[in-house]
C-alpha cells in the first residue's frame, strides 16, 4: 500500500526556476500528486473491501478510479525524474546512443522538441505527451494521452511532459506555449538516456 511520496529532485521546490516556479512545483507535488496517491490508496481499499464481501460488481465499479489515480501516480513519478535544475543535469542536448536514435527517428533533437511541443499544443483539455520507444522495433515515437491514461503495450515511456493546466497556470496562465518552450531547459536527458538503454 502506498502511503507516502518520494521526490527524486532536490527538496528545494524552487530548483527549477525560472523555468518552473517553486509555487508550481510545491502545489504540483505536495497537492496534486498527493491527491492521486490518496485516491489510489482509497480505490485499492474499496476494491479489497468489496472483494472480501464477494461484491465483485462493486469492485469492478472502482476500476475507473484505479485507472485515474493509479495513472496519475505513475505519470507524475516518471515526470519528476525527467526534470533537473538547469544548473545541474537539466537542459542541453541528448548524447550517446539516445542522441543517435533521436537523429535517426526525428532528424535532430531540435525537431523532436518541435514535434513534442506541437503534440502538447494539440491536446484538448488535460493530458500528456510522451517520447516513447517501441520495445520490439526499437523505434522512437511521440504519443499523447488524455487525462491520466498511461502509456501501455510495447511503448516504453522515456520522457513525459504534463500538459494539465496545474503544471503551468500559476506562472504562465494562458501562455502554455511558453511553458512548453521553457520546460526543455530543465529536461534531464540523463534519465531519458537511462530509460532508453534499459528498454
Ligand atoms: Mn500534473
Image (cartoon, rainbow, N blue to C red):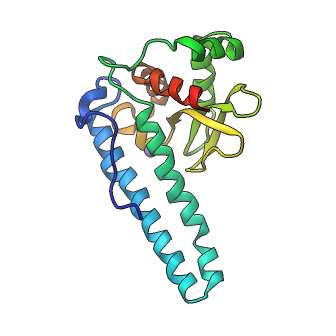
Q: Is residue 138 above or below residue 28?
A: above
Report which quarter residue 154 is drawn in.
top right
* Residue 169 in the image, given as x and y percentages of width and height: 39, 38
Disc tally is 0
Q: In the rendering, at what x and y percent does residue 69 appear?
A: 50, 58
Q: Is residue 172 left or right of residue 122?
A: left
Quadrant (top left, top right, bottom left, bottom right) of the N terminus: bottom left
Residue at (45% x, 29% y) in the render: 175
User: Where 136 falls versus 149 (above or below)?
Assistant: above
Q: Residue furthest right?
A: 137
Q: Position of residue 52 (x, y in %)?
A: 54, 85
Residue 171: image location, x then y, percent: 34, 33
Q: Residue furthest front?
A: 198
Q: What's the residue at 39%, 51% (across, down)?
A: 33
User: Which residue reaches farthest bottom?
Assistant: 53
Considering depth in this image, is 99 or 68 the residue closer to the camera? 99
Q: Tell me the quadrant of the picture where the C terminus can be found.
A: top right
User: Is residue 106 rendered to the left or right of residue 109?
Assistant: right
Task: Tell me what residue is drawn at x 60 percent, y 68 percent.
Answer: 63
- 34 or 27: which is nearer to us? 34
The quarter of the image that holds ligand 1 is: top left
Residue 143 shown left or right of residue 44 in the figure = right
**Residue drawn at point x = 32 percent, y = 23 percent:** 85
Q: For residue 98, what is the image quadrant?
A: top right
Amino acid at each position: 500500500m502506498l502511503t507516502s511520496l518520494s521526490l527524486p529532485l532536490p527538496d528545494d521546490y524552487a530548483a527549477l526556476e525560472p523555468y518552473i516556479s517553486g509555487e508550481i512545483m510545491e502545489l504540483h507535488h505536495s497537492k496534486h500528486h498527493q491527491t492521486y496517491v490518496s485516491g489510489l490508496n482509497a480505490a485499492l481499499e474499496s476494491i479489497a473491501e468489496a472483494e472480501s464481501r464477494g461484491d465483485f460488481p462493486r469492485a469492478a465499479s472502482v476500476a475507473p478510479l484505479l485507472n485515474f489515480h493509479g495513472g496519475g501516480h505513475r505519470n507524475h513519478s516518471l515526470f519528476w525524474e525527467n526534470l533537473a535544475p538547469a544548473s545541474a543535469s537539466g537542459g542541453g542536448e541528448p548524447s550517446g546512443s539516445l542522441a543517435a536514435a533521436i537523429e535517426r527517428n526525428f532528424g535532430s533533437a531540435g525537431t523532436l522538441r518541435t514535434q513534442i511541443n506541437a503534440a502538447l499544443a494539440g491536446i484538448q483539455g488535460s493530458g500528456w505527451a510522451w517520447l516513447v520507444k517501441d520495445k520490439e522495433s526499437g523505434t522512437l515515437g511521440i504519443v499523447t494521452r488524455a487525462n491520466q491514461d498511461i502509456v501501455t503495450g510495447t511503448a516504453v515511456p522515456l520522457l513525459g511532459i504534463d500538459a494539465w493546466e496545474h503544471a503551468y497556470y500559476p506562472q504562465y496562465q494562458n501562455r502554455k506555449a511558453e511553458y512548453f518552450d521553457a520546460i526543455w531547459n530543465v529536461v534531464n536527458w540523463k534519465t531519458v538516456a537511462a530509460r532508453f538503454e534499459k528498454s
